[in-house]
Amino acid sequence: MCLKNVEFSNRIKEKKMKKLNQIVFGLIVVTVIATSCNTLLDADSDRLMFPENHQIDSPNDSIYTMIGIFTQLQKLADRYVLFGELRGDLMDITENARLDLHEIYNFEISADNSYNIIEDYYSVINHCNYLINNIDTAFTVRGEKSLFKEYAAAKAIRAWTYMQIALNYGKAKYYVEPLLTVQAAQGDFPEYSIHELVPVLIQDLEPVKYAKTPGAVSLGVDMSSEKLFFPIPLLLGDLYLWNGQFENAAREYYALIVDERYVIDDRYSSTWTVDNSVFVSRDLFYQNYLDIFEITTSEQITLIAGSTELGEEDEMYRLTIDNYELMPSHVAIDNWNAQTYYYNRNATNPGDLRGFIGSYLSTKNTGAIFDVSTSDGNAILKYYLMWIEAEASKAVMVYRVATLYLRYAEAVNRAGKPNLAFAVLKNGMNSDALALDSIVPRHEKYSVYTESTGTFIDYVNFNNIVFDENVGVHSRGCGNVELATDFIIPHLNSLQDSILYVEDKIIEELALETAFEGNRFHDLMRVAIRRNDPSYLANLVSAKYVNRDEIRSKLMDENNWYIKP
């Protein structure tokens, strides 16, 4: 399957191409400290993985060591998407899909599946441990402990990787020292479940949460290393979310939003052209939601990126476009089609513009864009956009601004503030929305208040002028939703009922906004575990299958949520 020369493709190609010519140096070059490509915990290996007694006491040393971490992290990029989406409700397989993908799709992943290599995760962890245990955090430049940032960054990557192991495999072997010999790798390590692991990781990250991201290192014309790091407040927010400490989660997400001045503005909103309240066109040249997937946009927070300059393929582009092995599920498409686009109260149109020509393309409706063996089909668009915008690189998104705001909404909702959470979707976190008690009641936004004034709760104050640009996440594909009279929280019997309703809307919004990006299965897991209700996940995921009852029955057993290594 190939993309052909049509108006839409021309529009993409006319944009400035993102050249990352030097990313090879940053991510492909063989690190000077790694002496073996054997995987961690490989009992047949008798080689040392790292030099012993090597002190990392200069910026150059830390750069090369961090390169080793990034190089190992690349191996996890594609399976982050596949384990997170192909097991969820939004991604499907085509008739071209190979056996490995069928196994993931059917929750029957064999030990020899090419994506089922748990050692790759531990290799990332071992590289992080090496830096953490050998870096000189007291090293100073102009009075600043310059290497402390790399120390904290490695802890963040290690924490994220440990969570990926626990979320995908159910348990993670936990160790914090670098394993330099086979004998060390065969040690007796504690094994933690998700809920046992989360407090351990929180304790590890809390002391370094104020560390700034390491200075950006140029990896090409317009790509720098800053987007390859994992912000610690975001990771802590996720960990607190999994741990049920919802106000702590909200504070961490809010801290990152304020520190980085992240906003959901209308620059990435796709729109209809309307004339006298009549929908007249949808200009393919101005579907701004597409711009999110340019690798260097302000929307991106964390990427796992690599180079294709030495002939290495972009796996997600190959799976979604070249080989056409993955496609949107009918559930995903139905979700977008079921939404309403609002121009004003009298002028509405069916559908969410983040779907068609936002997250996927249809061969039926777009004519000659695709060459496919079948007459009708739908193709995932996001990884094509990332591929065409960066000719010599590949990338997978882990975190972006919309994800951050929706996690914030999930946290404040569970903290007992459903109206505040719903405002993230409908109105945006700005001073105008927060000023109206009809949008966010006083008890949800103020710690102390009277009839005329109040003091904002510490994680609710969005009065800074920078946040005046904030709009509701839902408006990115559905127009002026702040005017919608039916996009509301209905009157329900209890606060708990309202919280559950809004949580469902947040999960729905994640499907509309972040489909195919790697988060889905774990988002559903988190809510199902929180509700102590495996049917929540089983019902949603099984809806895309022909053998729906069989898959639902399988997923009612939580043991089947996890991969056997």
Image (spheres, grey):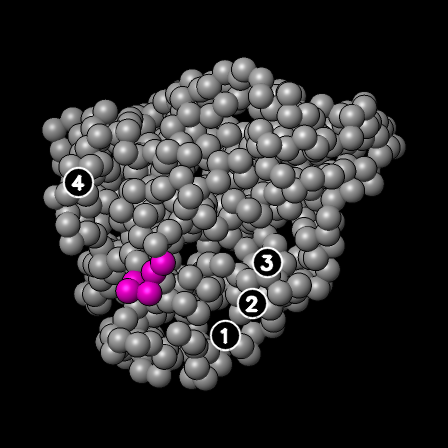
**Quadrant of residue 535 within the rendered picture:** top left
Q: Quadrant of the N terminus?
A: bottom left
Q: Residues within 10 Å of mark 2 (few under 14, many from 20)?
A: many
The residue pinned by badge 3 equals: 296
Of helix, strand and loop, which one carries label 1?
helix
* Disc 1 + disc 3, Cβ < 8 Å: no
Identity, as a three-letter code, of the amino acid under mark 3: Thr
Name the residue tied to disc 2.
389
149 with respect to 355 (left or right):
right
Q: Which residues are magenta?
A: 94-98
Instruction: Look at the magenta stretch and give its main secondary structure.
Output: loop
Please name whichever residue, 459 or 310, is drawn nearer the observer in this view of the structure: 310
Q: Amino acid at mark 1?
A: Ile
Side (left or right) of 542 relative to 199: left
Q: What crowding class fits label 3: few (fewer than 14 Cα within 10 Å), some (14-19), or many (20 or more)?
A: some
Identity of the amino acid at label 2?
A: Glu
Residue farthest to the right, as pictured: 142
| Up-down relation of residue 379 to residue 282 (above or below) | above
Location of the C terminus by quadrant is top left
Which label number is shown at residue 552?
4
Q: Which residue is mark 1?
A: 12
Q: Is residue 397 visible?
A: no
- Label 2 and label 4: CA atoms lie apart by 39 Å
Q: CA distance from mark 3 to mark 2?
A: 9 Å
Measured from the top left, where is residue 387 in percent x and y?
A: 53, 65
